[in-house]
Image: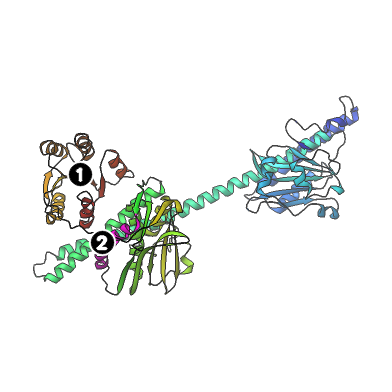
Amino acid sequence: MTHSEDKNNFLDDNFGENSLSTKELFDTLQWSVLQQEVIAETIPLLSKDSEISTDNIQETLKKIAKVSAEPIAIYRIDAEKSQFIRKGIHCQQDAEVALFPDNIPYKANENVIKLLRTIQVVYLSQNGSDAQPLQNYLSGHFDLTSGSWWIFPVQIKDKVYGLLAIRNPNLNTINNLLFSFYKSVALVFAQAFDRVAVIAANKEMLTRVDKANQLKTAFLTNISHEVRTPVNSIVGFSDLLADPDLTIDEREEFINLITQSSRNLVRMFDNIIDASKLRSEQMRFRQEWKNVNTILNEIETDYDEKQSISATDKVFTQINKLPDDVQAEIYVDVFRLNQVINILYENAQEHTTEGSIEIGAKLNQDGLMFFISDSGKGIDKEKHSEIFNLFESTKHAFTFESGGSGLGLSIAKEMLEQMGGKLWFDSEINEGTTFYLGFPERFFRVKKTEGKKEVHESDNWTGKNILIAEDVEFNFIFLREIINPTGANVIWAKNGVEACQTIDENPEIDLILMDLQMPEMNGYEAATYIKDKKPHIPIIAQTAFMMADEDEKCYKIGCNDFLSKPIRPKQLIKTVGKYFK
């Protein structure tokens, strides 16, 4: 029979209200005092160390035996292995030890722990007639032919730490006191195990905090170094450009080095911001259906520039598209997907000094996946488990990829997973590495079509009027010089107020490049006003102020697209060109 708070009177039938003589009452009181003394003696034994030793458990059980001579054992739960392990036992006869199992396994679907939380004791006997789930479970581990058993849950605050097992409990006239005594013993063990668990948890937390501080220090130290490296190049080569005796080739080389260092610096800061967004789950994704080959075409457009930056002609990059008759679309944030692919491509460039890099997509029985494969030096198997772990190792965290900040691959994996995809890789030393970007079936759709030749439109925007709302003159000149070769007419508004006035006075504006941080009226207010007056005019927001939800705010006020500074010429032309087709 299993006993709960309102069902523990199974022993009361053994005696009546007037069944005790004066001597029996005196003995009972004396025995009660002994129980209290034993409990008082056991508490220090179980609470003097951060971990409870086997000797202390044995000494505790020995003291408990002063009250009653029943064989007794204590079991502690091992949640990872789903079992109760015997931690101590005390028997008057050695032969009785074998009656207590070394461990008591359980299965999750048996709800053993949940049931133990609801009861005070499980009573096992060969003559038990009202078998219940816990009885059935425990009867398979204790020999009922040797006698009856009490099994007390060792629990506190609904947390089960183990079991207290007693064989042949004394069912005489003082059994209610004995029941209360063993219940108190179970509580003492529960408090001791709970104290140990709290101490262990605190130690683990302190260890994590200490490790986090060490890794944070290592990361910041590395970031300091990584910032100084490109800044040193930018400042140094800028000073050298002032030399009037430089040849044209030297001047061009210095400019290229300054450009490359600037991009490395911007990429590093972008990675830090993205890592922070991903960790705090503040990154927003704008997923849409996009043709896979269109995505690869855009990557191919940027290929020549990236190839020149790599400063080597020994590495050949190839873009592998899907067959022309396969029209595959993927539901993804294209900007973020390109960012992931760029991270993996730059990583491949860094570790491939000779050979080839392949970027592409393929359809097979596993579904649609993108891949970036290189013939580089590969990744040591010992580092496979660490390569995606952000701030995981002070020794290895900054040595896997270009840029050195140890963020790129971690960002790529986390970003892809938050979009619903998965990133993994195969690699062998000196044989190269292949990264795979996979998506579940619900994220892509495929259909067969007749092959069509892709039509490339030139960037001829003659007759188009573009309004640039930008308060910094240098930034305006930069944008104007990028747009001028297209033949478009450029108009400058120095703040949000001028931008609104220009729109009111000039009905021929075809597109607006809107800086968000401007005096008098910021870009948010100006865009809201313009979209209210002329919602058909595309507005491309641009800003260097990248908060977690900056792009989302832009789309909410009606902006059609978003560019983060520094803006690359090809990126600007491609974004504006979408609205002039």
Residue range of the region highlighted in magenta in the rendering: 291-313
Badge 1 marks a residue whose secondary structure is strand
Of residues 443 and 415, the one nearer the viewer is 443
Residue type at mark 1 is Met
In-image side of 471 versus 274 (left or right)? left
Q: Nearer the viewer, residue 136 or 393?
A: 136
Q: Percent from the top left, x then y, of residue 74? A: 74, 48
Position in image of residue 250 (x %, y %): 15, 70
Mark 2 and mark 1: Cα distance apart in space: 25 Å
In the image, residue 549 sits, relative to residue 342, either above or below, namely: above
Label 2 is placed on what type of residue? Thr
Which residue sits furthest top? 18
According to the picture, the residue beneath numbered tag 2 turns out to be 301
Between 411 and 331, the residue placed more toward the observer is 331
Dot in front, 2 or 1? 2
In the image, residue 298 lies in the stretch drawn in magenta: yes
State the image quarter where residue 355 is shown: bottom left
Residue appearing at x 73%, y 34% in the figure? 4
Q: Which residue is mark 1?
A: 514
Left or right position of 13 against 449: right
